[in-house]
Image: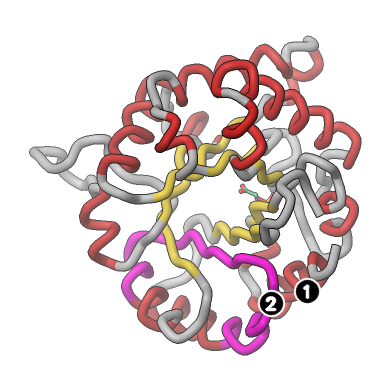
Amino acid sequence: MGGIMNRDFIVIGNWKMHKTAREAADYVERLSPLVQGTRSRVFLSVPYTSIAEAASAAKSSAIVVGAQNMNEAREGAFTGEVSAIMLKEAGARFVLLGHSERRYLFDESDEVIHRKMIRALQDDLLPVLCIGETAEQRAKGKTEEVLQDQLMKALEGVSDRDLGRLMIAYEPVWAIGSGNASTPQLTQESHSFCRKWIEKFFGKQVSQTIPLLYGGSVKALNVKEIATQKDVDGVLVGEASLDPEAFSAIIQNCEGI
Ligand code: PGA
C-alpha cells in the first residue's frame, strides 16, 4: 500500500470524451457488482452529459461520480461553460483540474487552474489536481522544477483545512495514452518529491494525509508494481477504465497490497 497509512487505495477512472448518458448508466450497472465489497475507493470522472445518469446508477453502490473540468466562475455570461454548483446538483462530488489535455489542448494556464481550484473548494466539489512534466521537460532535467511550479501556482493561498479536501495526481505527459507507464522507480521519485515539497510548504500533517495518485497507462498488468510504491496512494486510469471488466481487474489487483 502507498504512503498514506490506514487509508484505502483510490482508483479513479477518467473516461475523457467517451460514453453517452445511456452508456454511462449501463457501465455503472455492470461495474457495481464487480467492485462490491472492495477496499479501494472507486471514482469515475465522466463527461458532463453523463454525470446525472451515472450518479443515479451509482446511488446504491460506493462508486463516486465526478467531472473532468469546470468553469472558474460561479455563474455568468460564459456561453458553453458549466459551473461547480451545476456539477454538484447533477450529482458530481469531485472534479479533475489541470489535466494535461486541458493544459495543452485547451491552453489552460496555471492561473486558470488555480482559480478553478479555489472555486471548486468554495462550492464544495473535491478537486483532483493533475500535474506532470512533458517528455521534453524531463529530457532537459526539469521534472522537479515543473512539478514544483505547478504545485505552487495551483495551491497558493489554499487553507490548511481545504488542503485536507483535495487530491493530487502525478501524470507524466509522456506516459499518458502511450501504453507505457512510467517505471515504478521514476514514479516513486516524483511522488516523493511532491510529498516533500508539500511538507516544506504546508507541514507534515498535510503531506501525510494528502492522497498522491499516479496516472499514465495504468492497467491491470502494471498496477500492482505502481500501487506498492511507498508514496503512491492511488491511480488515475484513462483508457483501461473504459471497460468495466478491465477497470474492475485493476481494482481487484490493488486489493490487499
Ligand atoms: P491513460 O490516461 O490511462 O489512457 O494513459 C490517463 C489520464 O489521462 O488520466
Q: Along the horizontal axis of the image, is 156 left or right of 167?
A: left
Residue holding disc 1:
252
Q: Which residue is depicted at the point 81% across and 45% down?
A: 181
C-alpha span from label 1 to label 2: 8 Å
Residue 141 image offset from top left, x and y in percent: 79, 11
Q: Residue furthest left?
A: 77
Q: Are marks 1 and 2 in contact (CB under 8 Å)?
A: yes
Looking at the image, is mark 1 or mark 2 earlier in the sequence? 2
Q: Which amino acid type is marked by label 2?
A: Thr
Q: Which residue is mark 2?
A: 38
Residue 177 in sight: yes
Quarter-of-image position of residue 66: bottom left
Does 147 appear above or below 14?
Answer: above
The N terminus lies in which quarter of the figure?
bottom right
Say which of 118 and 116 sits in front: 118
Quadrant hosting residue 57: bottom left
Find the magenta span and give its range: 30-52
Residue 133 is left or right of residue 152, and the answer is right
Give the residue displayed 45% in from the left and 80% down from the top.
Answer: 58
Q: Secondary structure at mark 2?
A: loop
The secondary structure type at the circle numbered 1 is helix
Amino acid type, label 1: Gln
Bin the neighbour count of mark 1 within 10 Å (Cα to Cα): few under 14, some 14-19, many 20 and up.
some
Toward the front, the furthest residue is 205
The reply to whether residue 101 is visible in this rendering is no
| Up-down relation of residue 216 to residue 173 (above or below) | below
